[in-house]
Image (cartoon, rainbow, N blue to C red):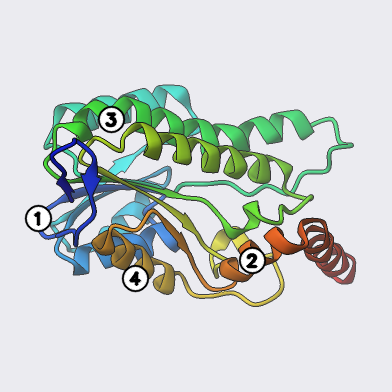
Amino acid sequence: MRIKSNGVRKAHTTNLEGKLAVVTGGGSGIGLAITNALRAAGADVMIVGRNEARLNAARGDDSRILTAVADLANPDDRVRLIEQLSGGRPLDILVNNAGSMTRIDLHNPDAQSLIEHDLALDLEAPVRLCIALLPVLRQRPEAAIVNVSTGLIYAPLAFNPGYSTAKAGLHGFTRSLRRQTHRDPIHVLEVFPPIVETELTKDFGGPKIGPEAVGAAVVKALRQDRNELRIGRAKLLYAMSRIVPNGIFSLINRAAEKRALDA
């Protein structure tokens, strides 16, 4: 990206070769797919996750993949990660991907604690990482923040109220972040995947896409300096939510409720 004479960013093709990216939830699923796509584009990647064995398996023998064990729902782990990223090799790309998608019955006594966990990981963690690492990213000649949201912000699943609330909040935050950093050398990209074949969605029916398609699309969008990336059926959800918002919400949730009864 370049900066115009008036201080506003001017879009151009981004070179990922040699840049350092951190990918939260990078040990599996969409995060691993993004990691592999970034590595194929020549970037070095630090993957963050709770499971050290999974991170090591994802890294394999690739010396340009680094690992950091952290539970980003835990405030202390967040602080340690931020200190690590602020004091080492300068960071170029932050990918907020880690997430939780808990099925929660609001009638149950544990509903509040389950929602708080989803909010901590899906909303509070990416917001805190973005704000804390903004000074680092602003010092780079060409930086990026990628927030992985979901196509389901256009038709939230009622059985996942914590996840739905968090992703809607992340969408609003990302738009605010993009607006406030439009004079900085930072590309802010929000990604809206459809249902993806991952451990997170193993209990979901209906059509899914492979995580590799998401990883490739994210790298392409970074290179093209795009602001928003809707993938697959997320494009349809977006269009339908603008035409018949209540209708698409009811349709999605009736289908989910039927699958739950049939299971």
Q: Tell me the mark number nearer the camera, choosing from 2 and 3.
A: 2
Q: Tell me the mark number nearer the camera, choosing from 3 and 1.
A: 3
Q: Could you say whether the residue bearing mark 4 is in a helix, strand or loop?
A: helix
Which residue is pictured at 71% across the width and 56% down the height?
155
Q: Is residue 132 above or below residue 51?
A: above
Q: Is residue 65 above or below residue 115?
A: below
Q: Could you say whether the residue bearing mark 1 is in a helix, strand or loop?
A: loop
Q: Is residue 87 visible?
A: yes
Residue type of the residue flagged with mark 1: Gly
**Real-space Cα distance between discs 4 and 2?**
23 Å
Which residue is pictured at 68% across the width and 59% down the height?
242
Residue where numbered disc 1 is placed: 18
Residue where numbered disc 2 is placed: 239
Residue type of the residue flagged with mark 4: Ala
Q: In terms of sequence position, does the residue under pointer 4 or pointer 3 come before the other? A: 3
Q: In terms of sequence position, does the residue under pointer 3 or pointer 1 come before the other? A: 1
Point out the image quarter for the C terminus: bottom right
Residue type of the residue flagged with mark 3: Leu
Q: Are marks 4 and 1 in contact (CB under 8 Å)?
A: no
Which residue is pictured at 31% across the width and 34% down the height?
181
Q: Tell me the mark number nearer the camera, choosing from 2 and 1.
A: 2
Q: Are marks 3 and 1 in contact (CB under 8 Å)?
A: no
Q: In terms of sequence position, does the residue under pointer 2 or pointer 3 come before the other? A: 3
**Real-space Cα distance between discs 4 and 1?**
18 Å
Residue where numbered disc 4 is placed: 216
Image position, residue 231 (x, y; %): 50, 68
Residue type of the residue flagged with mark 2: Ala
